[in-house]
Amino acid sequence: MLDCNNPFWAFSLSVYARPGVATECLALQNERNVDVNFLLFVAWLGHAYALTLSDETLTSIDANIAVWRDTAVRPLRTIRQRLKPLPTMSEPAAQELRAQIAQLELRAEQIEQAMLYALSRDLVDHNSPAQRTTPADAILHNVTALLARHRTSVTSMDATPPQAGHLIAEAIAYRPAAS
């Protein structure tokens, strides 16, 4: 059973709400077709486990979520976005429908994140200590590696990609709320 209210979801809600992160993530989504949930996941794996991911592992993770993302998340997003400019959107009923679709989209994203979270235990268990580093270095490595797959202008694994600077900084600074 998927755990929709997990530590990764808490991380995502907190980090995404920090100044500049949402704007940055949405730009990457819209301009580079980056899956924001996947992007947050690789940052969280770095934060939570100091785990660095190989390109092969990134491919495997992507394969595990692609069908859900392409069948549930993206179609809901497309519908929500395509409704926005319609003249009918001035009507309260149309606005209510768009808000309901936005809530469904968020729920679909939460399910995608639960799917990703379910993968985390295997990823941690099957990666050697040699694939571990400091959380900050792991976050930088993972985000940079994922963005490189989307042909962003990352020139070095040592340089913070400007497109994800806020995300990286906030993921490094993240501290879970006390229970």
Image (tube, rainbow, N blue to C red):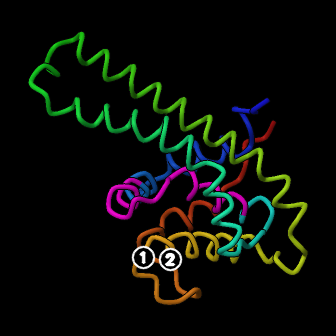
Taking the spot 23% from the left edge, 35% from the top edge, the residue there is: 82
Label 2 crowd (10 A; few <14 / some 14-19 / many >=20): some
The answer to whether 104 is drawn above or below residue 10 in the figure is above
Q: Is the magenta stretch mostly helix, strand or loop?
A: helix
Res. 148 mark: 2
Q: Mark 1 points at which residue?
A: 151
Q: Is mark 1 on a helix, strand or loop?
A: loop
Q: Establish if 61 lies above or below 90.
A: below
Image quadrant in which you'd find residue 151? bottom left
Q: Quadrant of residue 78?
A: top left
Q: What amino acid does circle 1 point to?
A: Arg
The answer to whether 24 appears left or right of 81 in the picture is: right
Q: Distance between the residues labelled 2 and 1?
A: 5 Å
- Regarding mark 2 in the picture, which secondary structure is present there? helix
Place of residue 80 in the rendered image (x, y in percent of width and height, measured from the top left)? 31, 32
- Disc 2 residue type (three-letter): Ala
Q: How many marks?
A: 2
